[in-house]
Image (cartoon, rainbow, N blue to C red):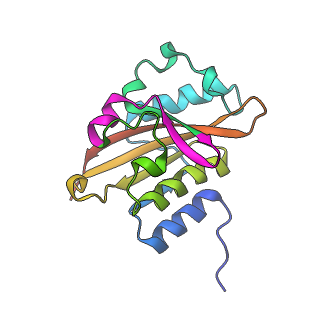
């Protein structure tokens, strides 16, 4: 009998492999994109050693990142996009105010939900790399920082997500 992976990211990677999702979850935060490394540092500083809350971030702190990021909030067991960056909108359309299940096609919803659930369970920022599976975007790869945000009581209540897009290298 195979052992169950012990960490949220190991379970995510096992699920990605089993489902054929072109995604890898990396807890080392070894980003190729310097902007994502910088945003991970902003997240750490805002949290003062714990999980930051959305209100711990100011526009000044995030000024260089806003067009490439979104805040995702958890609402009654669903994920809703807030402050959806204009650079993200160029690839997907504007998802501001939409729930994940309203924005993402049904075929891709389980992998998106699993990604966000993994970050919430880990209570740590994680790096994801993925290749788009939509026909019109199959030439695009994404490197993502997804980091948890806390409510006033310290429970995970949302995510800060930023994406760097690049062409797929053959």
Q: Residue furthest right?
A: 153
Quarter assignment of residue 157: top right
Q: Is residue 122 visible?
A: yes
Residue 162 in magenta? no
Residue 93 pos. (x, y %): 31, 39
- Give the left or right position of residue 66, taking residue 122 as reference: left
Q: Residue furthest top?
A: 60
Residue 62 pos. (x, y %): 48, 21
Residue at image coords 37%, 27%: 67
Does residue 72 lie above or below 53 as drawn? below
Residue 24 pos. (x, y %): 45, 58
- Give the left or right position of residue 4, taking residue 160 as reference: right
**Nearer to us in this view, 154 or 61:** 154
- Give the left or right position of residue 125, taking residue 100 as reference: right
Residue 84 in magenta? yes
Q: Quadrant of the C terminus?
A: bottom left
Segment colored magenta: 74-91
């Amino acid at each position: 009998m195979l052992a169950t992976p012990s960490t949220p990211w190991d379970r995510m990677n096992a699920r990605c492999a089993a489902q054929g999702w072109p995604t890898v979850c990396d807890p080392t935060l070894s980003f190729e994109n310097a902007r994502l490394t910088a945003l991970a540092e902003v997240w750490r500083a805002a949290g003062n050693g714990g999980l930051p809350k959305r209100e711990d971030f100011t526009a000044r702190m995030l000024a260089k990142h806003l067009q490439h990021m979104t805040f995702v909030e958890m609402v009654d067991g669903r994920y809703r996009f807030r402050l959806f960056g204009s650079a993200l909108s160029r690839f997907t359309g504007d998802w501001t105010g939409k729930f994940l299940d309203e924005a993402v096609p049904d075929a891709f919803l389980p992998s998106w939900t699993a990604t966000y659930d993994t970050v919430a369970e880990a209570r740590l920022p994680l790096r994801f790399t993925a290749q788009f599976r939509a026909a019109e975007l199959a030439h695009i790869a994404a490197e993502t920082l997804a980091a948890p945000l806390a409510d006033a009581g310290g429970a995970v209540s949302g995510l800060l997500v930023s994406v760097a897009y690049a062409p797929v290298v053959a």
